[in-house]
Every structure is written in structure tokens, then in C-alpha cells.
């Protein structure tokens, strides 16, 4: 999808430093970090949300998760702990319609997952 902001990042039309790059996945820093470490791990392919994942994309999700654990080690936050998050759709609070895995850590994190009005 040409006007997708994360596709533009993948194509190099928006310049960011990649923390990881393979033929299928890239990772880079979130522009509005919620914690000292806040990275986004995304597929190069435009996949709008987890609702669009098919069985033959299991290995892609595995690569994204392993990328996150490797980056957590590299950043030195693995032992302290971190949060991995994939928001999906309106109720999930997804802002950018291109799957992205958040790696958030470097400080103790708030719970931040309770439903509104519950
Ligand atoms: P969501 O709310 O969809 O799970 O997360 C989208 C994330 O993308 C947000 O944390 C937001 O700060 C980040 N983001 C949005 N636009 C850009 C951008 O142009 N560059 C980078 N590096 N991050 C972005
Ligand atoms: Zn996209």
C-alpha cells in the first residue's frame, strides 16, 4: 500500500535507522517512545493487522518475535524484562494499519491494558 507510513519506511522514502533488517522484517525506533527502549518490528510486506495473518505466515511472526528477543538482549533489557505488544483494530488501539510488534522496556512499565469503563 503506497501511502502507508510503514511501507514508506520499508522502501526508504522515510529515513530511519534500521536496528535489524532481513528479507522479510525490519526494526526501528518508535518516534514517540513510551519508555527508554521502544522499538517497532514490522514485516516488509504490507499486512494491515493480525486479522490478516494466514497459516503460511507463521514463520514471519516467529521471526518478528525472535528479532524482538535479540534486540532486547542487545539493548541489555532482557534480564530486567520488557513488554511485547501487537495492537489490533479499534479496540486494540491500533493506529498504523501495518502490523507492528512493539518492544518496550528499560524501565518498570505500567499495566496499561484494562478495558475502559470496566
Ligand atoms: P499502534 O498504536 O498502531 O500500535 O502504534 C503505532 C506506533 O507507531 C506508535 O507508537 C507511533 O509512535 C509509531 N509511529 C507512527 N508514525 C511513525 C513514524 O513515522 N516513524 C516511527 N519511527 N514511528 C512511528
Ligand atoms: Zn504498509
Image (spheres, rainbow, N blue to C red):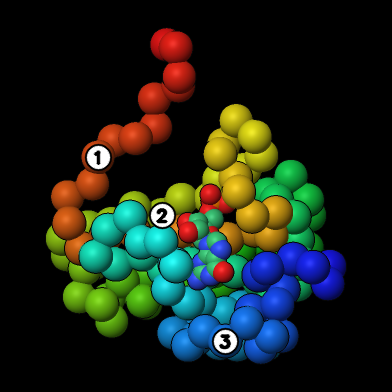
Q: Which residue is painted at 24% across and 65% down in the image?
A: 36
Q: Residues within 10 Å of mark 2 (few under 14, many from 20)?
A: some
**In terms of sequence position, does the residue under pointer 2 or pointer 3 come before the other?**
3
Label 2 to label 1: alpha-carbon separation:
13 Å
Residue at label 2? 84
Label 3 to label 1: alpha-carbon separation:
31 Å
Residue nearest the viewer, comparing 88 with 80: 88
Asked whether residue 103 is in view, the answer is no
The quadrant the C terminus occupies is top left
Which residue extends farthest right?
1
Residue 25 x, y percent position in the rendering: 61, 78
Mark nearer the viewer, 3 or 1: 3
Mark nearer the viewer, 2 or 3: 3
The quadrant the N terminus occupies is bottom right
Q: Relative to 16, say whether 47 is above or below.
A: above
Mark nearer the viewer, 2 or 1: 1
The answer to whether the beta carbon of the residue marked 3 is less than 8 Å from any atom of ligand 1 is: no
Residue at label 1? 110
User: Toward which corner of the image does residue 89 lie, by quadrant?
Assistant: top right
**In terms of sequence position, does the residue under pointer 3 or pointer 1 come before the other?**
3
Label 2 to label 3: alpha-carbon separation:
24 Å
Q: Secondary structure at mark 3?
A: loop
Q: Relative to 86, say whether 58 is above or below.
A: below
Q: Is residue 33 left or right of residue 80?
A: right
Q: Which residue is painted at 60% across and 30% down in the image?
A: 91
Q: Is residue 12 left or right of residue 45?
A: left
Residue nearest the viewer, comparing 16 with 26: 16
The answer to whether the beta carbon of the residue marked 1 is less than 8 Å from any atom of ligand 1 is: no
Residue at label 3? 15
Pointers 2 and 3 in contact (C-beta within 8 Å): no
Q: Secondary structure at mark 2?
A: strand
Amino acid at each position: 500500500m503506497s501511502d502507508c507510513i510503514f511501507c514508506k519506511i520499508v522502501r526508504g522514502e522515510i529515513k530511519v535507522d534500521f536496528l535489524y533488517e532481513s528479507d522479510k522484517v525490519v526494526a526501528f525506533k518508535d518516534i514517540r517512545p513510551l519508555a527508554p527502549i521502544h522499538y517497532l518490528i514490522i514485516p516488509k510486506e504490507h499486512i494491515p493487522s493480525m486479522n490478516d495473518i494466514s497459516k503460511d505466515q507463521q514463520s514471519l511472526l516467529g521471526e518478528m518475535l525472535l528479532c524482538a528477543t535479540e534486540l532486547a538482549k542487545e539493548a541489555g533489557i532482557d534480564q530486567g524484562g520488557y513488554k511485547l505488544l501487537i495492537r489490533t483494530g479499534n479496540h486494540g488501539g491500533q493506529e498504523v494499519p501495518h502490523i507492528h510488534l512493539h518492544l518496550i522496556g528499560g524501565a518498570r512499565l505500567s499495566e496499561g491494558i484494562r478495558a475502559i469503563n470496566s
